[in-house]
Structure formats: structure tokens, C-alpha cells
Amino acid sequence: MLSAVKGLSRYHTEESLRAYLLERSHRTDDDCLVIHGYGSRRGIHQKVAGRAWAHIAAFVVLVGGYDPALDVDQTCGRADCIEPTHLRQVSRSEACRTRAQAAQCRNGHDRELDATTGRYRRVCRVCNQEAQRRWRERAAAEVAQARAAYGRG
């Protein structure tokens, strides 16, 4: 079954991988088992044991019954959680449909609900307006620079 996991180092057995994952993880207050993979970023999907995703490797050795055609999803919403009771296998469309969305954009603006889908809009209107304003300013500066180069300032 370990051969079905992409990027997993070949020297691991199920027992050694189970011990490896539990050694690199700790339990949080909200009952998640958070893994520390390669790199310093936390709160994102982690890679361990070669180049395998930690939540997929954990599903294989801690839960069992892995189907490579389905996605492994965390019910708690934490991307770096490998708690067996929080892992489930679902189709790609189901994983996307149930994914939690933040109420604010990364710049802290409130996001609007899309009337057709009932989900938050992908692009924040305020951030989009600011990006368009910056683009117009850059374009105007390039035009002014080109006119000045041809002597038509």
C-alpha cells in the first residue's frame, strides 16, 4: 500500500513510517495532531519522508484503505493535521465544495458573498480596485516616459 503514495521514500515500512510521523508531530489544544515537515512554514500542507504529503502518508498508515483516485481531506480544516479521526477520503469536487473560506481577504477586507453560488467571491473588490489603480498609474508613467523620450512631453 505504501507504493501508492507519490514521493514516499522507499526505505520506509508501515511501522517505521507510523513512528516517524508520530515522532514529528504534537497534539494541540483543539485535538489536532500537527506534523512538522520540511521547512519553516506552518499551517500549510507538510511534506515528510521523501517528498510525500504528510496527510496522505498518515492516512495510509494510521487509517488504511487508501484509494489513490480520491483526495485525502482534513475535516478540521487544518492543512498540517494528521489526526486519524480528522482524515477522510473524498472526491476532488467534494473536497473543494466543503473547503472553508475565510471571511476576510489576506489584506483584512471583508469579502462579499456571490449571489449565484452562495460562497465568498474569490477576489476582494477593494483589493481589485487598488490593483487596477496601481496598474493605471504604471501605464500612465510608461506613456509619459515614452512621450518624453520622443520629445513630446
Image (cartoon, rainbow, N blue to C red):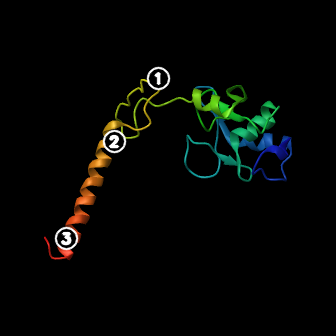
Q: Position of residue 125 (x, y in %)?
A: 33, 37
Q: Quadrant of residue 143?
A: bottom left
Q: Residue at x 59, y 32 (%)?
A: 96
Question: The residue tagged with tag 2: helix, strand or loop?
Answer: helix
Q: Quick one: 70 or 115, which is closer to the camera?
A: 115
Q: Mark 3–mark 2 contact, CB under 8 Å?
A: no
Q: Is residue 103 visible?
A: yes
Residue type highlighted by circle 3: Arg
Residue type highlighted by circle 2: Cys
Earlier sequence position, callout 3 versus callout 2: 2
Q: Position of residue 53 (x, y in %)?
A: 69, 45
Q: CA distance from mark 1 to mark 2?
A: 21 Å
Earlier sequence position, callout 1 versus callout 3: 1
Q: Residue at x 74, y 37 (%)?
A: 58
Q: Which mark is residue 127?
A: 2
Q: Which mark is residue 147?
A: 3
Q: Residue at x 47, y 26 (%)?
A: 119
